[in-house]
Image (cartoon, grey):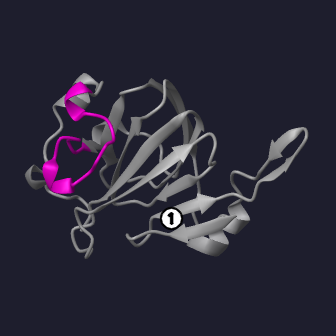
Amino acid sequence: MQFLSTAISGVYIIEPRIFQDARGYFFESFSQRDFEAQLGPVHFVQDNESMSTRGVIRGLHFQRPPYAQSKLVRCVVGSVLDVAVDLRKSSPTYGQHVAVELSAENHLQLFIPKGFAHGFAALSEKVVMQYKCDEFYHPEADGGISILDDSLGIDWRIPTDEAIRSEKDIHLPLLANIVSPFD
């Protein structure tokens, strides 16, 4: 497994070592030992899976402290544009984002530490996402930022006026209208 730095400290693209032959392929998608050696201690407590169709944009979501979550995200069917936005107020990259295409073909994963909002756009007809979280879901700690926030400069690669969003996501505020809980 290779842990590739991104333009934002703490966010990593993880590229597995893939073994292929006539039977297909094999790779290790997670190793606690490798993870801790590269990023320090992380204890995942919950695995989630979502299915989406082309044009769905989910996010940008986060959980407020003390229930903030780190996530390890991967796409096992189709392809997505996966996005992490830095909400750490004291960070030099506050309000900036990392965007990476995750797909069933490239097998890349994205590690998103606490202090970030996360979302993705479904680029293929069907998408299945899996992600590990290091904190349980707490609805009272839910937070989010609108995907329509132009100040973030995200190219979702699908027209946002045609995006399929949840009712909750439609009403999320702009970054400028939230008080970051990550100081």
Outermost residue toward the left in this view? 177
**Any magenta on residue 161?**
yes
For the point 77% across and 54% down, the residue is 18
Of the pair 28 and 17, the residue shown nearer to us? 17
Quadrant of the snapshot with the C terminus: bottom left
For the point 53% across and 61% down, the residue is 13
**Vertical order, 14 against 20 (above or below):** below
- Give the image quarter of residue 76: top right
For the point 25% across and 76% down, the residue is 92
Quadrant of the snapshot with the N terminus: bottom right
In percent of width and height, residue 73 lies at: 52, 47
The three-letter amino acid code for the residue at tag 1 is: Tyr
User: Magenta stretch: dominant SS?
Assistant: loop
Left or right: 157 as drawn, with respect to 130: left
Of the pair 87 and 52, the residue shown nearer to us? 52
Q: How many marks?
A: 1
Left or right: 23 as drawn, with respect to 158: right
In percent of width and height, residue 122 lies at: 42, 33
Of the pair 12 and 20, the residue shown nearer to us? 20
- Residue 164: in sight, yes or no? yes
Left or right: 99 as drawn, with respect to 106: left
Disc 1 is placed on an element classified as strand
Residue labelled with disc 1:
12
- Give the image quarter of residue 123: top left
**Vertical order, 158 against 106 (above or below):** above
In percent of width and height, residue 59 lies at: 32, 39
For the point 34% across and 57% down, the residue is 116
- Residue 66: in sight, yes or no? no
**Any magenta on residue 110?**
no
Image: magenta residue range? 144-162
Residues packed near mark 1 inside 10 Å, few (<14), some (14 to 19) or many (20 plus): many
In percent of width and height, residue 81 lies at: 42, 44
